[in-house]
Image: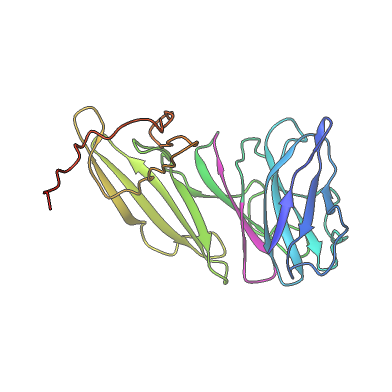
Amino acid sequence: MSRVRVPAAGLSSFLFVTLLAPALTAAPPGGTPICRERGAQSSPAAVPDGGGILVAWLDARRGVLDLYAQHVLADGSVDPAWPAGGLPVTESGGAGGPGVFPDGSGGALVVWFDAGASTVFAQRVQANGTLAAGWPANGRALVTETLNGPSGRIFLWSADPSGHLYVAWNTFDSSTERLLLQHFDPSGDPVWASPVVAGVAGLGGAGSPRRSSMPRRTKRRSYGAASRTSASGPSRPHSPTSRSRTAPRATSPT
């Protein structure tokens, strides 16, 4: 496993990679600089590729959010075959944080959500530092349906070692919200004739869920000096002096 970190550096953020385990056999103590371009680099993601790691990140060098990728060799150095400063994965200007997965051929699939287009995209990056032939310069649209609903926007992705992608998203109409799942092959084409319905929520009177099999976030609580936290709103401090409303149970004389 490898980790990427983004330290602040004046008007720029320089992207570094730090060794954690055997994906890289060596790296400078302060990490390997991946990108030194002006503008912020953020939301990095990395995946081992058998000969080092491939890193993708959000990049604001143009003043908007694009995605770039870079290959780091097993000795901790940046691959000289790749473009200096990174390979543009998309320059749409509206990219979100990426997910990176092996494509089964030594390259990687980069997946992201574009807020401006309200669409999930993917791009295939080859091991030689170029985009795969036949893939659009700004990525291939995988999901173009409305990606929101009463339970909030949901989009999840994963992949298997052969480069097949699995993308989940939610969509809704006036009465029903659905969580859908589709399987894509390494070319970005859907494998299933239609998405699988993974969850359904019926909507009641004012648009609130009436019965739901959609995923729910759970509440987390901690007590003492900490405060209660909940996904539904701000927390209120827990008072260690608060008393239980349950009356003490009487005991029989012995």
Q: Residue at x 30, y 52 (%)?
A: 199
Where, quadrant-wise, is the N terminus in this rendering?
Answer: bottom right
Q: Which residues are magenta?
A: 99-115
* 220 w.r.t. 17: above or below: above
Q: Is residue 253 above or below residue 93?
A: below
Q: Position of residue 192 (x, y in %)?
A: 39, 63
What is the total number of numbered labels drawn onto the structure image?
Answer: 0
Residue depicted at x 57% and y 72%: 162
Magenta stretch holds residue 48: no
- Name the quadrant containing residue 246: top left
Give x and y (percent) for residue 14: 81, 42
Residue furthest to the front: 254
Position of 142 with respect to 101 (left or right) is left
Q: What's the magenta bit mostly, secondary-structure-wise?
A: strand
17 lies left or right of 246? right
Res 6 quadrant in image? top right
Q: Is residue 110 magenta?
A: yes
Q: Is 167 or 128 nearer to us in this picture?
A: 167
**Foreground residue, 178 or 134?**
178
* Residue at figure coordinates x 27%, y 50% from the top left: 213
Residue 237, horizontal then vertical, whole percent: 44, 29
Residue 115 image point, x, y percent? 54, 36
